[in-house]
Image: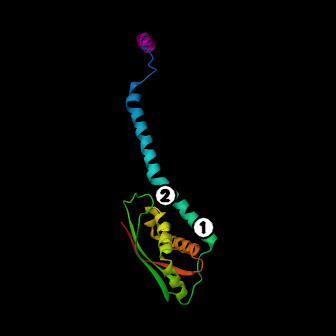
Amino acid sequence: MEQLNEEQDLEKKEKVVLDTPVKGGFNAKILLFGLPLFIIQLVAVYFITANILLPKIQANAELAADVEEMEETDTVATVNTNLGQFVYVVEDLIINPAGTDGKRLLLSSIGFDIQTEENQKELQSKEVLVKDAIISVLGSKDMVRLSDAVYRDTLRMAISARINQLIPSVKINNVYFSKYILQ
C-alpha cells in the first residue's frame, strides 16, 4: 500500500513538472540592468585608456625616439678640462609646454658651458637663435616629460643638438639648468 501511495505521489509530481510551462525567451532584467552596466564599463575603459595609458605609451615612445636621435647625431661634446670656464647664460625663459593650451608654464634659465670666449661672443651675438632653439625644444615636450627629472638629461642633449644644428661653429660642452620651475 505504501508503495502504491509513493508511486501515485511520484506520478503527481511528474505531472506537475510536465504541466508547468517552460520559461524561455526574453528577460527584461537583462535590458534594464545589464545593458547600462555594460555601457558604463565601456566608457570607463575608454577614458582610462585614452587619458592614462596612451600618454604614458606615447611619452615612452617619444623618449626612445629622442634618445635614438641624439645617438645618431652624436652631439655629446668631448670632456674638456676647462669645464665651467666660459658659460653663456640665458635667463628666465617662459615656455608653454605642448598640450597645455597656455594653462601651464615652465620658467627656465639655462647655462651653456662652451670651450672658448669666441664661442661665448658668438652665442651672445646670436641670442635670438639660441632662445628660439630652447623654446622650440622645451615647448614641443608635454608636461609628463618636462616633470620627469630623469628626462632632463635628454632635454640637455636635445637643446645642445638644436643649437649645434643652428650654429655649428659653437661646440657646447654641457647644458645646465639654473632654474626649472613648472607651474
Residue 161's quadrant in the figure? bottom right
Horizontal arrangement in the rendering, residue 152 relative to residue 79 (left or right)? left
Would you identify the image quadrant in which residue 108 lies?
bottom left
Q: Residue furthest right?
A: 72
Magenta residue span: 4-19
Quarter of the image for the C terminus: give it: bottom left
Instruction: Name the foreground residue: 32 vs 53.
Output: 53
| Image-quadrant location for residue 45 | top left
Q: CA distance from mark 2 to mark 1?
A: 20 Å
Pinpoint residue 6: horizontal percent, then vertical percent. Answer: 42, 13
Query: Counting other residues with Cα less than 10 Å from the Cα at mark 1, is it few (<14), some (14-19), or many (20 or more)?
Result: some
Work out whether residue 170 or residue 7 is closer to the camera in this orientation and state it.
170
Local packing at callout 2 (Cα closer than 10 Å; few below 14, some 14-19, many 20+) is few
- Front-most of residues 66 and 160: 160
Residue at figure coordinates x 46%, y 49% from the top left: 50
**Magenta residue check for 38:** no
Q: Coloured how?
A: rainbow
SS at circle 1: helix
What predominant SS class does the magenta segment belong to? helix
- On the image, numbered disc 2 is attached to which residue? 56
- In the rendered view, would you say 4 is above or below 110? above
- Horizontal and vertical percent position of residue 157: 54, 73
Q: Which residue is mark 1?
A: 69
Which of pointers 2 and 1 indicates the residue nearer the eye?
1
- Please name the amino acid that badge 1 sits on: Glu
Residue 30 in picture, x, y percent from top left:
41, 29
Relative vertical location of residue 8 with respect to residue 66 in this rendering, above or below? above
How many marks on residues? 2
Q: Quadrant of the N terminus?
A: top left
* 40 left or right of 72 in image: left
As helix, strand or loop, the secondary structure at mark 2 comes to helix
